[in-house]
Image: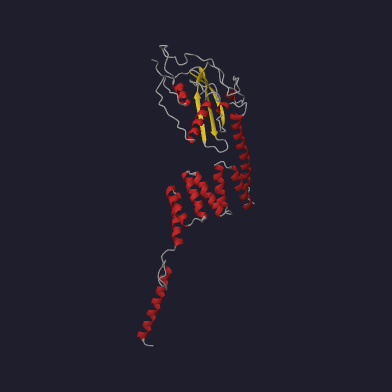
Amino acid sequence: MNIPCLMQSLISRLSVICLILLSACSSRPLLSVSAIAPDSLSEATKREIVAASLQSAKGEYHEAVSRYRKLLAAQPSNAALHYALSQAYIGLGVIDSARLYSEKSVILNPGNKYYLRLLAAISRQMRDYSQTADLDRQLVALEPGRTEPLFALAFDYLAADQFEKVRKGMWRVVNDADGTARKARVKGFEVAGKTGTAQFWRNGIKDYHTWFVCFAPYDKPRYVVCVFVQGGHSGGSVPAPIAAKILEQIFAMEKGQEVKLEVISPAVGNFQPIAGIDFSKDLPAQYGGDAPPAPEATGEETPETDNSSNGGTPTAKPDIKEDADSHANNKKPQAQGGLQKFFNFLGGGRSAVPKQSN
């Protein structure tokens, strides 16, 4: 073999070796039989999932939710995407949507313990102890060697029992014959609530903070009402009937009845104690002298005095003072007080401003 042929052979071999080395060091092979193909759909999806996960980790939950929803539109049966979207909604504080997508992830993959744990945590936060207990039972079966699901299941049973006891107790406060909030009953609806009365001193004068909190309807609550009245006689005699009136008008609006609103003009208030509220009267607020509050002020669930003789709702009969609103320095009768106008306004249909006589 002559020298030119030998050199040509060596150059060819070196070229092949260089190509092999460059191909090994390069991220893409330099020698390929076919042309370079674009990213597949799965690779693009992976990039979007990573981007959404990073946004969620940085607290950019709105952007993460938007990405996850687009991904779910293309892959509605992807349990992992439902799970990730649920976590993003938790970051936004939208608990109902978080529960919806968490439930879908469990339906699509009921054997995934992480999906079950997330849904159990959401259900527990929403006080749905029945669903939480069911999920924890599944976790106990999936993780027989772990004690945490057993403790969680025990808590679920206790919480469900105590929660229902509290609900039933609030129902009895309103609906039992000797309940302290009988005046909170609303015809056609079951109301449950709790009264409260606390004594305090205002410039050396004994006074009472009274309140009543309730929810309705009892089986499937839609509304919560809390009424606080300073200077009331008791939670059952003053705030409770106000709460009942609010609920009555809410339910009336649901049926299409128009509830008229009126502008209440400013007026001088007063610190006279309010003995009771009766919306069947032209002047709902009934003022009375300083008297001990109803027994719920001490935490005792004993009934209020029932002075009715017709078997209907008890009506308080305080020592009404004609000059309850006449407390200005000139001792002249004043316009209705702010509280009185408010109660008249709640009564519905009656003007809060007294009419001038001709």
Q: Is residue 86 above or below residue 168?
A: below
- Residue at horizontal 63 percent and vertical 46 percent from the top: 150
Q: Residue at x 51, y 28 (%)?
A: 245
Q: Left of 135 or right of it: where is 243? A: left
The quadrant of the picture occupied by the C terminus is: top left
Q: How many marks?
A: 0
Q: In terms of image quadrants, where is residue 126?
A: top right
Foreground residue, 206 or 329?
A: 329
Query: Compared to 215, does 28 lie above or below?
Result: below
In terms of depth relative to the viewer, which is nearer, 125 or 284? 284
- Whether 110 is drawn above or below 251: the answer is below
Q: Is residue 69 left or right of residue 109?
A: left
Percent of width and height locating residue 229: 50, 24
Q: Is residue 180 left or right of residue 3?
A: right
Q: Residue at x 54, y 45 (%)?
A: 122
Residue 85 point in image, percent of width and height? 48, 50
Q: Quadrant of the N terminus?
A: bottom left
Which x, y percent locates residue 20? 42, 73
Say which of 350 and 336 sits in front: 350
Specify whether residue 98 is in view: yes
Residue 53 spot, x, y in % from top left: 46, 52
118 left or right, relative to 68: right
* Residue 49 showing in the rendered view: no
As drawn, the residue found furthest toward the bottom would be: 1
Residue 51, above or below 122:
below
User: In terms of image quadrants, where is residue 264?
Assistant: top left
